[in-house]
Image: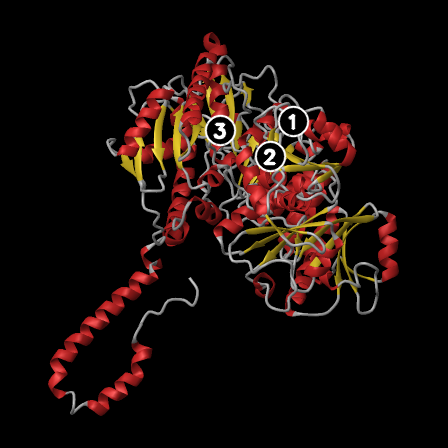
Amino acid sequence: MWTRVAVLLLWVGCGGCTEKANTSGLIQYTAADFYEKLHSGKMMFLYFEHQGSPTISLFLVELEKSADALQDYGVLVGKVNCNKEVVRTYCVDERVMHTAFLFRGGKEFLSFDLDTVFDVNSIVSEVLFAILRDEVKYVHTDADLLAMEKAARGKKDIVLGYVSSLGTQDHRSMMETAYVYGSRYQFILITGGPVLKHLGVNESSHSSQVWFLHCRVPSGSLNPVASERCPLTRMRNPVSTLSLHSFLQLMEAPLVSEVYDDPSSVLPPQFPYQQTPQVFLFSRPETKHLDLETATALAWRLRGLALLLLVHRQSPAVKTPDEYNAAYRLPGKSPEVKYLILHSLDEVLDLFTSQEKEDEEDEDEGLQDEEEEDFDFGALDDEVAASVFESRGNVLDMDSVAQLTSDNFHATVAQSSLTVALFYLRWDAVSTAFLSSFIEVAERLEDSDIDDVQMSAVDCGEWTDLCAAQTGASVPFQAITAFPTVLLLRPQEPAQLYGGMLGSVALHRFIMMSRLASPVLLSTNEEATSFLQEAPHAELAGYRPDRVLGLFRTHVQTGLLVFTEAAQLLRGEVLTGLLTDGPAQEWAAGRAVDLPAVLVFPSWKTHTHPLVLPASSSSAEELLAHIDAALLHPMPELTVENLPSFLSLGKALLLLFVGEEEDEIGRRQNQALVEEMRGVVESRMERYLACWIHLGRTPAGMSVLGSYLGSMPPLPALVLTHLPSGDEIYQYPPNSPIVASSVVHWLKRVEDGSESPAGMLGEDSWPPAADFYDFLTVMDTQESTRQQTHEEEEEEEEGEEEERLPELMLDAEAEPEMQFPCSPPAEV
């Protein structure tokens, strides 16, 4: 490792030595050279040049700069001129014009879009990041970090780095350091998220930071931080390769050094600690153990700021007067030691943190100025827009998602049995937020070796003709009018719209269900039993989907076509199967079912008691309505995911809110309330949809209940809302027991008008995000002012109209251009 450290320091110290020598590690490869180096197993970062452009020319300049840096890490950097040398795969496809490739072990290891490797820092950082992908971990949550701390406890210390965005100088410094010290420390990289909250960092901060987590703490160390978390030390200096090296060396220094000489006789810190202050605490023989504990506690607080030495006064070499109990020496030319009389350890800490606090205050003032400038743009919209704004510097890795254009759309769809296409706009907050979930699903499918699904995306801001489905485009979908939109495309089939939640879990489940045939053709009773009981796919283990089974005597029986069409409409959401001929008659006979029939197996019911529907529907839509009604739970639990589907039924919601149970007794009480509400369902629920919300599993329900009634009522609470006839909200008497008969009488009073509403639904108004966004109000105000001025002028000039007729005619011609001084944009 020390050889690698020497190489690193030599490169850092030399700075631009390679450029001064006018040498370059960039190699112009021929096709033969490429194959020779490839088969030798050397690591290569190559670009295959097709034709020149200003963008490509700038990239080649940066590529040449990176060659000098990457050769120190054993990476050959070069280019192949495809106009002179043709390399199969890489010189025959024009899409690689905007891609650079990393080869490792005789094969292509990774590809990089030129947008992500645009300068020497991004090239070096991304290449090293790729090489160290198994060594440098990336964590998203504090739970992930805690798991890594537990795994490293007693084995390895952790170096945790935060960079606001990848491909920067700070990211490069982290990767270069990880390359050298990766065998000694566990390196972790973050670019934001919940981990920063644990570290006490404001996510709006754009400055990179590094922490050292002392997980390899010796068992004999008197560590005052007794918890499952590793004690951490923050690096105070700006992130650079040299500062990181110095910081790591400082972390290896002894926590407390015991000396028996006077502080004035102790040598100043030697390399590599020469720029680190020294703090001296004095110990007496009678309090030796207590003094050591005190020094250790202070040393943990001074980690990264100063070296702590415990001076034993029992030595005759110590000449410091007894009145002093501490001393310090600052780095510099003068080795002068200053002596102090301290009353608390905080005074020592303040001595070395005061300057740091001043620097942080200056930095905070600068950030505050930036925040004030960005405030109108960062806090304009809802939580989604705010999240997107805060993470605007993060670059998403879209290697697992194919980019569809007007040129390659048809070819890409034809090559895959299933293409999942995301139509989005880069400037749309919801699109940008969902894009990360879409990429997460693509990476999960890739890791699961599922090769029959092609995840792809279309930037509708760039490929407007494709998204608009213009005449002559011959695309299998209508014009995209809402963003984001996800379509499932199959060759020679109409597009299938995804209408679920914009999250990775729901989308992944929908895709896995859509991979299955709809309906699944069954030929034996055993296959039918397996269809009803087993998980449809290993990736869906633990998930119990709704199932529908069609039973028909022959393949041409009336109603079979209607059932098949309905099954296609249910694809991705409900698992459908088809059993015909003799096996169908045998299966039906054993269960007393008359053919033809459609059996519905809701996920909330046992498979032994299916719901039987007649197979005589005249259309797929009619059969689909019957199936949806059969799948509906009589007393469903309302969640964020299923709320839209329940609201679409157009019924008033009879909502039971229950709290989180503290024990088994609480769980049974909540279950008894739900069972009691089922009695209401059975007696009087033609106009209402009875459902319940568990506030422990769905915390958003607390905000909903509070907004309904103006305050949080005692739980359980029963309310009637979303009435088709009005916006009133009714609350069942809070102090009355929830009994089915009493609830039915209360509903009658609501219908008779004898019950007073407890609140009103808020108006569905969507005001502008900020005053200056309200274009319509601006236009109305200007129009009103212009009209009022015009009327006053007409009254004053009414008597002079005939004399000024020619002039008014000229003004009328100019009027359309002057009507709206502040015109709205073409599209809002």
Q: Secondary structure at mark 2?
A: strand
Q: Position of residue 472 (x, y in %)?
A: 64, 69
Residue 260, image x, y percentages: 54, 18
Q: Residue type at mark 2: give it.
A: Leu
Q: Nearer the viewer, mark 3 or mark 1?
A: 3
Q: For the residues carrying marks 3 and 2, which lies nearer the camera in this image?
A: 2
Relative height, residue 215 to residue 86 (above, below): above
- Residue type at mark 3 is Pro
Marks 3 and 1, how far apart at CA = 55 Å
Q: Which mark is residue 613?
A: 2
For the residue pair 592 and 366, the one nearer the viewer reads as: 592
Mark number displayed over residue 634: 3
Give the SS element for disc 1. Answer: loop
Q: Position of residue 592 (x, y in %)?
A: 67, 25
Q: Nearer the viewer, residue 297 or 500?
A: 500
Query: Residue 19 at what x, y percent from top left?
Result: 68, 59
Dot 2 or dot 1: first in sequence order is 1
State which quadrant residue 711 falls in: top left
Q: Residue at x 42, y 28 (%)?
A: 349
Which label belongs to residue 156?
A: 1
